[in-house]
Image: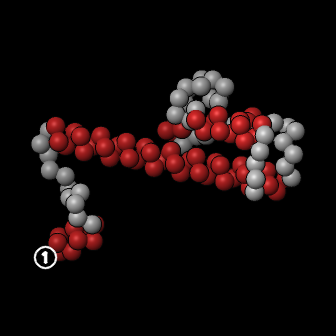
Amino acid sequence: MTIEGPVKENLITAAKSLFIDNPAIWPLHLTMLYLGQIPDLNALIPPDHGLNNITLMRLRTHISSDWHTSSIRLAGRIFGDYQRRMANINNIPLKTPLHHPLSTYISNRRQ
């Protein structure tokens, strides 16, 4: 699937604005990606897009899935970094060592 022209430009602009309060992308002028919401893709794809219906539905599905999953992963990483930083500040040992794989940690707990 090759996307070109204004569709590609609008989607790239929207992707760059996912984590900032851009009124052109977010109708309420505030980013809502951290709540699992994505911008309205219908507003980003112009009516004269030149794509058939199946390609358009696949494009919307893939983009919404990728953006949603990426935002969840980013939120998890930010939360994990925050927890690690707070544990260091408060001298609290982490529950899982960062230098050991999870399987090693689990096998050591059983002993």
Please name the residue shown 81% across and 36% down the image. 46
Residue 5 showing in the rendered view: yes
Q: Which residue is mark 1?
A: 111
Measured as percent of width and height from the top left, residue 19 is found at 52, 34
User: In the rendered view, does 4 fall on the left or right side of 32?
Assistant: right
Depth order, front residue of 7/106: 7
Please name the residue shown 87% across and 39% down the image. 48
Q: Quadrant of residue 37?
A: top right
Quadrant for the N terminus, please: bottom right
Residue 32 showing in the rendered view: no
Please name the residue shown 58% across and 46% down the image. 67
Q: Is residue 41 above or below residue 93?
A: above
Residue type at the position of mark 1? Gln
Element under disc 1: loop
Quadrant for the C terminus, please: bottom left
User: In the rendered view, does 72 fall on the left or right side of 13?
Assistant: left
Please name the residue shown 87% across and 45% down the image. 50
- How was this image coloured? secondary structure
Number of labelled discs?
1
Q: Residues within 10 Å of mark 1 (few under 14, many from 20)?
A: few
Q: Is residue 14 above or below residue 50?
A: above
Measured as percent of width and height from the top left, residue 51 is found at 84, 49
Measured as percent of width and height from the top left, residue 68 is found at 56, 47
Measured as percent of width and height from the top left, residue 38 is found at 61, 40
